[in-house]
Amino acid sequence: MKKFLVVLMVVLSVFALAKVKVTFWHAMGGGHGETLQEIVNTFNELHPDIEVEAVYVGNYSALSQKLLAAAQAGELPTIAQSYSNWTAKLIQSGVVQPLNEFVNDPKIGLTKEEWEDIFKPLRDNCMWGDTIYAVPFNKSLYILYYNADAFAMYGVDVPKTIDELYEAARIMTEDLDGDGKIDQYGFGFRTTVDFFQILLLLRGGSILKQVDGKWVSNIDSQETREVLAFVKKMVDDGIAYFQGGYLNDIFGQQKIMMYIDTIAGRPYVESSTKGKFTWSWAPVPTWVTNKVPFAGTDIIMFNTASDEEKRAAWEFMKYLISPEVTAYWAINTGYIPVRRSALETSIWKEAAKSDPLIEIPLKQIDNAVFDPQIGVWYEIRTVVGNMFSDFINGKVDMETAIKTADQKIREYLKEEYGE
């Protein structure tokens, strides 16, 4: 009997020490990865029965490839970062866990008020119809970076409309050394799908539109032509500099006076401008609308996990989007908090008091829009990016560029819908 009790105590102690493991694949490197690990460590300390292992698998491209391969091989983690178009593909593969049962659970879920506390565009981006497949994670908004010293010197107001942006760019464009070549451009942009899409949304257009519940190409539109014409006019008038790569370095070199990019680029701007001039940022200027896209990933759970692992993973996902944690994440990484109540936390208020810039991007959050939640969105983005770049670089005329893109988009959508 005594021997039996000893064995029983050993068995019980093993079970008491056992932890439910949650494997979390992510693409947050550098300082962002360090902040994420801090959050994971704190969660693990607060939840001795759960062990979250954060696994950095490389950049987004590497993460995407690894997830798709793991889905085929049946070797998925418990949870992972995912763009909505990745999630769409994984949903089609039948491996993504719907979260409604967790969100709506009366004991471990979120109240209606807590769920609706997540900023609506971010919340909607996590849903396919009425099914919740994700929670928002690292989200950033687009913003207008500008050289505050130059604006003051030229007596130019920060542009609030596209027309004002054009005029400000014109005033600040100069041939400083008199050699007949422009040295300082009022505006800079990248020849990427992101910049084109920002202007297209502002103009009231879109790359795709929904008809009878399906996405169809909307690139062959008057709005597309007006956006292309406007950007080409800025280039032809000599007031805009463009390139394919990031703009923070030439902004720091004062070759351009303003440009549009995500708030995630702030650390690079601070580094390139340090000791040279004062920079600031403002909401993206409006055109016909004030809609702007947001960028970043969500966290999804996989249905290949055990029920115990799913429950533990949900506890971590819920922790990540708690007001204090999302505020801490935002303050330390430059992303936005995903919940409105995060702005009322003491940590956020203290940060905003010492750095008023962090609240400016959030003026746009209610106007933010997200990309179509379809598996071929990456391919469509590539098509549109090539259309924009080829046209701006003079490789193709406008009509050919648009018609070619429209045809390719239609082909990808047929692939999406199995037609």
Image: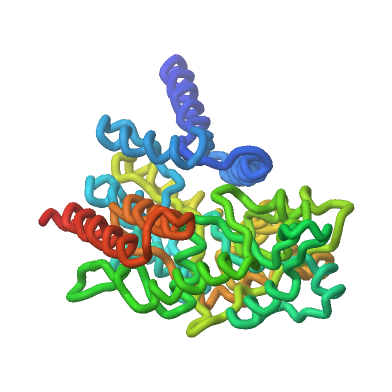
Instruction: Where is residue 13? Give x, y as percent.
Output: 51, 27
Which of 295 and 241 lies nearest the eye of the viewer?
241
Query: Residue at the spot x=52%, y=69% of the render?
Result: 231
Q: Quadrant of the N terminus?
A: top left
Q: Is residue 221 left or right of residue 238?
A: left
Indicate the colouring scheme.
Answer: rainbow
The number of discs equals: 0
Which of 26 and 402 lies nearest the eye of the viewer?
402
Q: Residue at the bottom extreme?
A: 288
Query: Residue at the spot x=39%, y=64% of the render?
Result: 371
Instruction: Where is residue 342? Give x, y as percent.
Output: 64, 68
Q: Residue at the left extreme?
A: 419
Instruction: Where is residue 47? Give x, y as percent.
Output: 57, 44
Q: Quadrant of the C terminus?
A: bottom left
Which of 44 and 190 lies nearest the eye of the viewer?
190
The reply to whether residue 348 is in sight is no
Query: Residue at the spot x=51%, y=67% of the render?
Result: 232
Q: Residue at the top extreme?
A: 3
Please say if 34 is above or below 361.
above
Q: Is residue 234 left or right of residue 35?
A: left
Query: Residue at the spot x=77%, y=62% of the render?
Result: 175
Instruction: Where is residue 282? Give x, y as percent.
Output: 69, 73
The reply to whether residue 66 is in sight is yes
Q: Is residue 144 left or right of residue 23?
A: right
